[in-house]
Image (cartoon, helix red, strand yellow):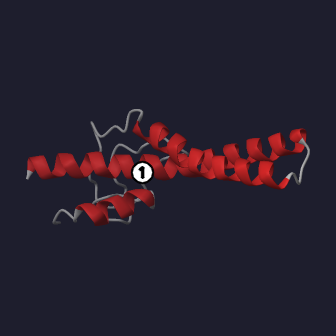
């Protein structure tokens, strides 16, 4: 099987699929990476995302929450406790939603770089 392009690998990673075949799942749970692809058998040994996904998730969530905060403050629609509840809920939901997507992206990027080095 040929190595896919970087763009294809990254899109497969965001979809939480194997960056090589795009069929097998990349995770065995919420964030636990599988050791090998269940479909094509590609090994992910040594493919670690470290702190990159958390860093990216924080950056993306900030770009969601800060405009929401500015909107809520400028309109004065809610009381401060209600605003805090909305912002806290939005922060938690967006963080938990984006973290696996960011981790899949980083794992695919690390895998793709390693695949290019080995030929």
Tally of marks: 1
Quadrant of the snapshot with the N terminus: bottom left
Question: Does the image show residue 104?
Answer: yes
Percent position of residue 47, x then y:
30, 40
Residue under label 1, please give it: 104
| Residue under the image location 53 percent in, 46 percent down | 99
Q: Residue furthest front?
A: 74
72 left or right of 63 in image = right
| Residue under the image location 23 percent in, 52 percent down | 112
Q: Nearer the viewer, residue 41 or 76?
A: 76
Q: Residue furthest left?
A: 119
Question: Does the image show residue 43?
Answer: no
Percent position of residue 89, x then y:
76, 45
Q: Quadrant of residue 21?
A: bottom left
Percent position of residue 94, x then y:
63, 50
Q: Nearer the viewer, residue 106 or 55?
A: 55
| Residue under the image location 27 percent in, 36 percent down | 46
SS for dot 1: helix
Q: Residue furthest top?
A: 51
Q: Is residue 20 above or below residue 88?
A: below
| Residue under the image location 34 percent in, 54 percent down | 37
Instruction: Assess disc 1: are there few (<14), some (14-19) or many (≥20) residues with their C-alpha within 10 Å of its C-alpha.
Output: many
Q: Nearer the viewer, residue 65 or 56?
A: 65
Q: Residue furthest right?
A: 79
């Amino acid at each position: 099987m040929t190595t896919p392009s970087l763009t294809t690998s990254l899109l497969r990673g965001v979809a939480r699929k194997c960056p090589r075949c795009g069929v097998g799942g990349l995770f065995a749970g919420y964030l636990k990476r599988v050791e090998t692809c269940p479909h094509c058998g590609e090994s992910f040994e040594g493919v670690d995302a470290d702190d990159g996904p958390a860093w990216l998730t924080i950056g993306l969530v900030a770009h969601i929450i800060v405009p929401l905060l500015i909107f809520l403050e400028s309109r004065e629609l809610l009381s401060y406790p209600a605003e805090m509840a909305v912002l806290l809920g939005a922060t938690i939901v967006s963080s938990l939603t984006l973290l696996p997507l960011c981790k899949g992206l980083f794992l695919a990027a690390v895998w793709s770089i390693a695949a290019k080095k080995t030929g």
